[in-house]
Amino acid sequence: MPMKTAGKSYKRILLKLSGEVLAGEEHHGINPAVVRNLAHQIIEVHQLGIEVAIVIGGGNIFRGVKAASEGMDRATADYMGMMATIINGLALQDFLEKEGVVTRLQSAIEIKSVAEPFIRRRLIRHLEKRRLVILAGGTGSPYFTTDTTAALRAVEIKADVVFKGTRVNGVFDDDPHKNPLAKRYTRLSFMDALQKQLKIMDSTAFSLCMDNKMPILVFNIEEEGNLVRAAKGESVGTLIDSQEGAYFYDE
């Protein structure tokens, strides 16, 4: 039987979205239909009374690490990647506000014409006033991923959990694309994940979450209704937290 991962009632979540999710099946650029659908799901969670902050990536437009591996200066490439996250943030903000939801875009890189500067206390105040907040520009510094941004911001705002919305159903004991018998974990402790060398987030982001006991929920955000089910505490994806013991999903 499946083992439930949660059953919790969340008050404040940090949703991490990769840029690739915004591209849909096109794998590059911004797919308006996909962004519109994401906006509807986020609004549905917001309507549950849950405060939502969103960290967005930029890989659908530009990947700094890839460019650096091909000879570009790493710091320059990372700054270009951060600018890409601002483009994605503007797109998501536009679709959210078209549905009548007050939304703020904050950027760790100063770009006054289109976004507020990231200020932790202002962000918290926006959430308390029932505004959705999109966080772009990464950490504002090169050499850090948007996974690290998500972990850092979640700790800063005292979120209940980091939701990592991906294109896979959770964390598996093997590559499900190569091994059809791979099993999905429903729950893992941070130590389980380390010992099994599972790639959940980059090492800096994962350490931040582990050191601050910030739970991470990895799930497929492309599956209709998953975000809302996760927000309600239903068994979706894989939950990584401080509780010892790993559990498999048994269909």
Image (cartoon, rainbow, N blue to C red):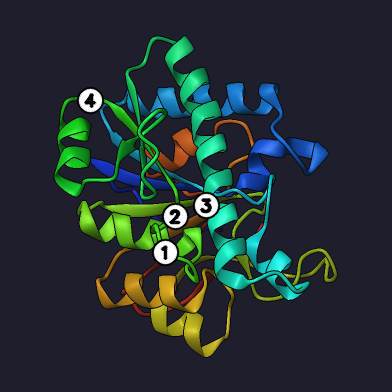
- Position of residue 14 measured from the top left corner of the image (x, y, whole percent): 36, 47
Where is mark 3, residue-wise? 82
Q: Residues within 10 Å of mark 4 (few under 14, many from 20)?
A: some
Sequence order check, earlier mark of 3 and 2: 3
Side of 180 where 16 appears, left or right = left
Residue ID at (78%, 44%):
27
Q: Quadrant of the N terminus?
A: bottom right
Sequence order check, earlier mark of 1 and 3: 3
Sequence order check, earlier mark of 3 and 4: 3
Above or below 197: residue 229: above
Where is mark 2, residue-wise? 138
The residues tagged by marks 4 and 1 sit, at their Cα atoms, a distance apart of 29 Å
The residues tagged by marks 4 and 2 sit, at their Cα atoms, a distance apart of 23 Å
Q: Secondary structure at mark 3?
A: helix
Residue ID at (55%, 49%):
57
The picture quadrant where one finds residue 76 is bottom right
Above or below 135: residue 243: below
The reply to whether callout 3 and callout 4 are in contact (CB within 8 Å) is no
- Position of residue 121 measured from the top left corner of the image (x, y, whole percent): 14, 44
Q: Which residue is at the far bottom? A: 195
Where is mark 1, residue-wise? 141
The residues tagged by marks 3 and 4 sit, at their Cα atoms, a distance apart of 26 Å
Residue type at tag 4: Arg
Mark sitting on residue 130 = 4
Residue nearest the viewer, comparing 215 with 76: 76
Q: Quadrant of the C terminus?
A: bottom right
The reply to whether callout 1 and callout 3 are in contact (CB within 8 Å) is no
Q: Which numbered mark, 4 or 2, is in the foreground of this view? A: 2
Above or below 138: residue 242: below
